Image (cartoon, rainbow, N blue to C red):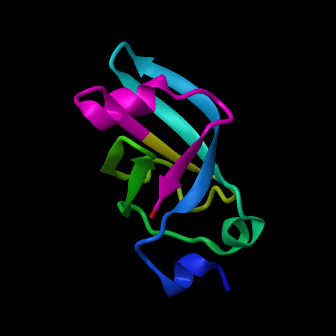
Amino acid sequence: MPNNAQNPFKPHLMRITEIRDETPDVRTLRLEFVDDTVAQTFDWHPGQFAEYSVFGEGGCVFTIANSPTRKGYIECSFKLMGKVTTALRRLNEGQIVGFR
């Protein structure tokens, strides 16, 4: 059982695997769980939200943007508006974010 199941405040680690600029101020990140066990068992419902964290900067809450029928990754779309979204925008593919 992942440690996060015992502590819901501890974020899962996710790797950025794709970055898409939808508009000049809206970006979508494709994220994959670092822990394969979590990747295989994680499930969500349409409209469900999560907190995305940039370590050392803070966290923001966004809806999971892709369909729950697409397994193995999640997508997060956000508009550049503040400290955390600015920090998210500076990240590159391969970097790690927190997810809970």
Q: Residue at x 60, y 46 (%)?
A: 31
Q: Residue at x 48, y 20 (%)?
A: 21
Horizontal side of 71 relative to 28 (left or right) equals right
Residue 82 painted magenta = yes
* Residue 78 image position (x, y, % from top left): 35, 35
For the view shown, which residue lies furthest in the right direction? 36
Name the image quarter holding the C terminus: bottom left
Q: Residue at x 41, y 51 (%)?
A: 52
- Total numbered labels placed on residues in the image: 0
Q: Which stretch is magenta?
A: 77-99
For the view shown, which residue lies furthest in the left direction? 81
Name the image quarter holding the N terminus: bottom right
Q: Is 26 rendered above or below residue 70?
A: above
Front residue of 75/96: it is: 96
Q: Is 97 rendered above or below residue 70?
A: above
* Residue 45 image position (x, y, % from top left): 45, 68
Front residue of 93/55: it is: 55
Q: Residue at x 59, y 57 (%)?
A: 13
Horizontal side of 23 relative to 41 (left or right) equals left
For the view shown, which residue lies furthest in the front direction? 56
Q: Is 15 rendered above or below residue 90?
A: below
Horizontal side of 40 relative to 42 (left or right) equals right
Front residue of 17/94: it is: 94
